[in-house]
């Protein structure tokens, strides 16, 4: 039924689905009070040893060696493998096939926009991780959804990594301007809006 995340029986957004009928889940949203509490209230404070903390979050936690498939990448991976992808140039090149292209951190550090924004190496690594399959895990931390992904976190909140992503986005937003006539759309693939 509606509102419980079950199959919608072809209702809702199915008219926008490619290929006909699809199984839809109902989107789950937090309350405004959740947003107002902020990131620290939700996941805690970051570790000041940024690089060490990110490595631990991806390589030494309960979910680090557990495989997951994010859905929009034709891949099965682990947080530990994704850490290697962004910290080992050869591993990044190896997985750069099909639609996935992993840029090397040293090249990104020289990028004009990264320099203008004043991005730290750790912030760029966090963004690289977020733009790959790890988005699935990070979103599960913040949304608690989908349930299988949230359960698969094994208590890992990726606290330092998420703080670095937010920091990088804020820095980039200060030196990037969208044209006034630009319309930005956000898709809800496979989701219908709640009542």
Image (spheres, rainbow, N blue to C red):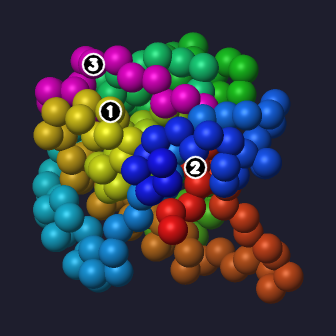
Circle 3 sits in a helix, a strand or a loop, which is it? loop
Circle 2 sits in a helix, a strand or a loop, which is it? strand
Q: Residue at x 70, y 79 (%)?
A: 177
Is residue 94 among the parts visible in the rendering? yes
| Residue 36 x, y percent position in the rendering | 29, 82
Mark 2 neighbour density, 10 Å: few (under 14) some (14–19) many (20 or more): some
Task: Give whichever of discs 1 and 3 has the lower sequence position.
Answer: 3
Q: Which residues are magenta?
A: 58-72
| Residue 195 x, y percent position in the rendering | 51, 68
Please tell me which residue lies in front, 153 or 91: 153
Mark 1 neighbour density, 10 Å: few (under 14) some (14–19) many (20 or more): few
Residue 64 lies in the magenta stretch: yes
Question: Which residue was labeled with disc 2?
Answer: 191
Q: Vertical placement of 151 versus 119: above or below?
A: above
The image quadrant that residue 136 belongs to is top left
Question: Is 177 positioned to the left or the right of 20 in the image?
Answer: left
Question: Which residue was labeled with disc 3?
Answer: 66
Circle 1 sits in a helix, a strand or a loop, which is it? helix
Please tell me which residue lies in front, 76 or 3: 3
Q: Of the residues tagged 2 and 3, which is closer to the observer?
A: 2
| Residue 89 x, y percent position in the rendering | 50, 24
Q: Residue at x 44, y 46 (%)?
A: 5
Please tell me which residue lies in front, 89 or 187: 187
């Amino acid at each position: 039924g509606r509102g419980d995340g079950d199959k919608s029986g072809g209702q809702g957004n199915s008219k926008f689905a490619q290929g006909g009928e699809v199984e839809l889940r109902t989107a789950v949203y937090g309350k405004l009070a959740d947003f107002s509490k902020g990131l620290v209230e939700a996941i805690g404070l970051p570790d000041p040893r940024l690089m060490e903390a990110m490595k631990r979050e991806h390589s030494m936690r309960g979910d680090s060696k557990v495989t997951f498939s994010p859905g929009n990448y034709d891949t099965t991976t682990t947080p530990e493998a994704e850490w290697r992808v962004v910290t080992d140039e050869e591993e990044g090149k190896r997985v750069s096939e099909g639609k996935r292209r992993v840029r090397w951190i040293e090249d990104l550090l020289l990028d004009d926009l990264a320099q203008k924004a004043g991005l730290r190496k750790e912030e760029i690594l966090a963004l690289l991780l977020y733009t790959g399959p790890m988005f699935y895990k990070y979103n599960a931390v913040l949304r608690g959804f989908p349930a299988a992904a949230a359960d698969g976190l094994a208590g890992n909140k990726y606290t330092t990594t998420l703080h670095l992503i937010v920091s990088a986005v804020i820095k980039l937003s200060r030196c990037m301007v969208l044209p006034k006539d630009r319309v930005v759309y956000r898709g809800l693939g496979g989701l219908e809006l709640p009542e």
